[in-house]
Amino acid sequence: MLAASLNFRDLLMVTGRYNPRQPLPLVPLSDGCGVVEAVGPGVAALQVGERVATCFAQGWVAGKPTRAGLKQTLGGPLDGTLREAMVLPELGVVPVPDHLSDVEAATLPCAALTAWTALVEHGQVAPGETVLVQGTGGVSIFALQFARMAGARVIATSSSPAKLQRALDLGAHDGIDHKAEPAWGKRALELTGGAGVDHVVEVGGGGTLQESLRAVKPGGHVALIGVLSGSSTSASLLPILMQAVRVHGVLVGHREAFLRMNRAIGCHQLRPVVDRVFPWHDARTALEVLQSGQHFGKICVSF
Ligand SMILES: NC(=O)c1ccc[n+]([C@@H]2O[C@H](COP(=O)([O-])OP(=O)(O)OC[C@H]3O[C@@H](n4cnc5c(N)ncnc54)[C@H](OP(=O)(O)O)[C@@H]3O)[C@@H](O)[C@H]2O)c1
């Protein structure tokens, strides 16, 4: 292994909140980049010396997910990437774009693929559409980058004016401080001349859904990804039916989508936004920094 990256899920996992019944010990983290040191008999698609990234859901190669496939995820219940060497099936990894550093490549398996699945695979985001991304964490910053790559307009929300400025520097067209403006859905409506946004990258969950449904246009798309503000909601479900909104749950994505995403990343020379890199033996500090929410983009570890 060359590098690994952290996701909010890893924090939930190591604090016992993701699955309190997870058998221990467990090697944490789902995302990593490594170099192939050896291949077993019959392996045709991988070369020794090739750089690859891990697939989050080891049993989901293409098509619709299965219950069994969704149970084979790295960093719980399967042992994850915070280790110097690992053995994976041929279809459990993908080659990574050449222009990326090892650390950058390690950011792709969960956060990037989740944003890609939400906006491109499910959302079919198109030029001129408007995408609202919530916060400036790993998933949302990739969503911002993919939306820009597709020629869409981006409205970013954040609790921090300084982070909003960084989102604007990265290509967002408008920023909303959701702490200063709790009715940020209304503000998004105003920013779109009353039309509403085409896509919402919903990482807040229970506490943000109501504003997301206010921000989205009739017939628009809410990609339900995270529950940072809780998994229960008092939001009215009526706007979903009355405005024919499509709420689509996302669970990262499959290997074929990962390959398509990597082709796009290579073609556009997209560079993931890495906030900080820690040595692997300092992974605990890395998780604490993730928990503090100070980061912008991805927190990584290198080996
Ligand atoms: N379903 C899936 O496949 C999938 C995949 C990946 C992640 N997720 C989930 O998506 C969420 C984000 O994951 P991540 O790895 O990107 O996390 P992250 O990097 O830790 O990002 C967290 C950021 O989200 C913003 N935020 C926090 N609470 C918020 C709230 N109540 N409303 C709006 N924004 C808020 C903050 O940005 P500011 O500081 O700018 O405000 C914070 O820095 C998590 O719930 C995670 O479990 C789901």
Image (cartoon, rainbow, N blue to C red):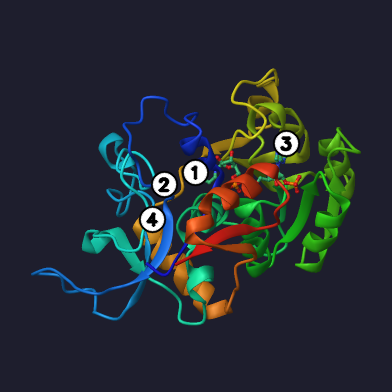
Q: Earlier in the sequence, mark 3 or mark 2?
A: 2
Query: Would residue 152 appear left or right of 300 to someone viewing this image?
Result: right
Q: Earlier in the sequence, mark 1 or mark 2?
A: 1
Q: CA distance from mark 3 to mark 1?
A: 26 Å
Q: Which residue is mark 1?
A: 10
Q: Which residue is mark 2?
A: 28
Q: Earlier in the sequence, mark 4 or mark 2?
A: 2
Q: Secondary structure at mark 3?
A: helix
Question: Disc 2 marks which amino acid?
Answer: Pro
Q: Secondary structure at mark 2?
A: loop
Ligand 1 within 8 Å of disc 4? The answer is: no
Ligand 1 within 8 Å of disc 3? The answer is: no
Q: CA distance from mark 4 to mark 2?
A: 7 Å
Q: Earlier in the sequence, mark 4 or mark 1?
A: 1
Q: CA distance from mark 4 to mark 1?
A: 11 Å
Res. 212 mark: 3
| Contact flag, marks 4 and 3 (Cβ < 8 Å) | no
Whole-percent x and y of residue 53?
39, 65
Q: CA distance from mark 1 to mark 2?
A: 7 Å
- Taking the image in four quarters, ligand 1 sits in the one at top right
Q: Residue at x 78, y 44 (%)?
A: 196
Q: Is residue 239 above or below residue 185?
A: above
Q: Secondary structure at mark 1?
A: helix
**How many residues crowd mark 1 within 10 Å: few (<14), some (14–19), many (20+)?**
many
Question: Disc 3 marks which amino acid?
Answer: Ser
> Quarter-wise, where is residue 162 in the image?
bottom right
Question: Disc 1 marks which amino acid?
Answer: Asp
Q: Which residue is mark 4?
A: 81
Q: Residue at x 68, y 59 (%)?
A: 144
Question: Disc 4 marks which amino acid?
Answer: Thr
Whole-percent x and y of residue 216?
73, 40
The C terminus, quarter of image: bottom left
